[in-house]
Amino acid sequence: MKQIVVFTGAGISAESGLATFRDSGGLWEKYKIDDVATPKAFIKNPDLVLKFYNIRRKQLSTIKPNVAHISLNRLSAKYKLSIVTQNIDDLHERSGSKNVLHLHGKLTEARSTKTNKVYPINYKELNIGDLCENGFQLRPNVVWFGEEVPNMNKAIKKVSHAHIMIIIGTSLNVYPAASLLNYANKAKRIILIEPKGVKMNDIEVIKEKATQAVPLLVDELLMN
Ligand code: APR
């Protein structure tokens, strides 16, 4: 079976109602990365950091996967499908996707600040005083700026075996995630779905929103 790797960012969840980061009105217009998404920020003002993720987790519990998330799963009829996402939402999983690798962690998990043990918390709040079983403060199980991306090598391995790579809803601004593109050496096709439209050598760019483009692209890939 041919392998397809779908590499997603915030844009695939935009039409479900989740703000992206760098579009106008995006999260990084409302919050400073250094205040809410770095290890230093958590030391300096843990309450603010936990509140930032509590707001996003609460919102996540009120929204649903969109037709882009859902359509991707149809590819499993003909391809070995892997999803590598920069998103910390659970919309791929809730759409029925099985093989989802999160590069930047999961909003629905907490992690012990001491033992690094991971605890599922679904959409519950995480506050100061919420401790792991060993009595240490819990933090969101997400990758903050400046932290290691533990799943990067796994993601590189998947992309290096892909016959087709589909990139959806990412500005390809953040490394090392954005460098994944450089490992798609076996890919016959690299397709980027980006409503802003960008010019990139050897990449097929579809200048449309995810919910428009993904169902049609899946139809095409299942036909030929
Ligand atoms: N359909 C498809 N793409 C969309 C849509 C849509 N409906 N709406 C917006 N986009 C595109 C935007 O044009 C932009 O190129 O999605 C991209 C979102 O880019 P970012 O906001 O930078 O999000 P992302 O690339 O996922 O950010 C990467 O940065 O802040 C960190 O950890 C965070 O995982 C995140 C990483």
Image: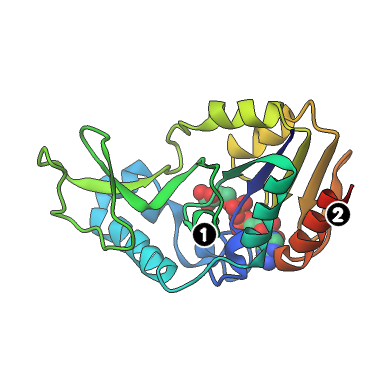
Q: State which tag comes first along the sequence, 1 or 2.
A: 1
Q: Amino acid at mark 1?
A: Leu
Q: Amino acid at mark 2?
A: Glu
Q: How far apart in space, not on screen, are marks 1 and 2 (Cα)?
A: 24 Å
Q: Which quadrant of the view contains residue 124?
A: bottom left
Q: Which quadrant of the view contains residue 218?
A: bottom right
Q: Write the residue at 81% across / 47% down.
A: 191
The secondary element bearing badge 1 is classed as: helix
Above or below, comparing residue 113 to residue 90 in the picture: above
Q: How many marks?
A: 2
Question: What label does residue 220 carry, if any?
Answer: 2
Figure quadrant, ligand 1: bottom right
What x and y, as percent, mark residue 60? 43, 66
Colour logic: rainbow
What x and y, as percent, mark residue 35? 37, 55
Left or right placement of residue 88 versus residue 112 in this view: right
Left or right placement of residue 129 versus residue 67 in this view: left
Q: Disc 1 designates what residue?
A: 91
Q: Write the residue at 45% across / 31% down.
A: 150
Q: Write the residue at 53% across / 65% down.
A: 29
Q: Nearer the viewer, residue 123 or 147?
A: 123
Residue farthest toward the left in the current orientation of the protein: 135
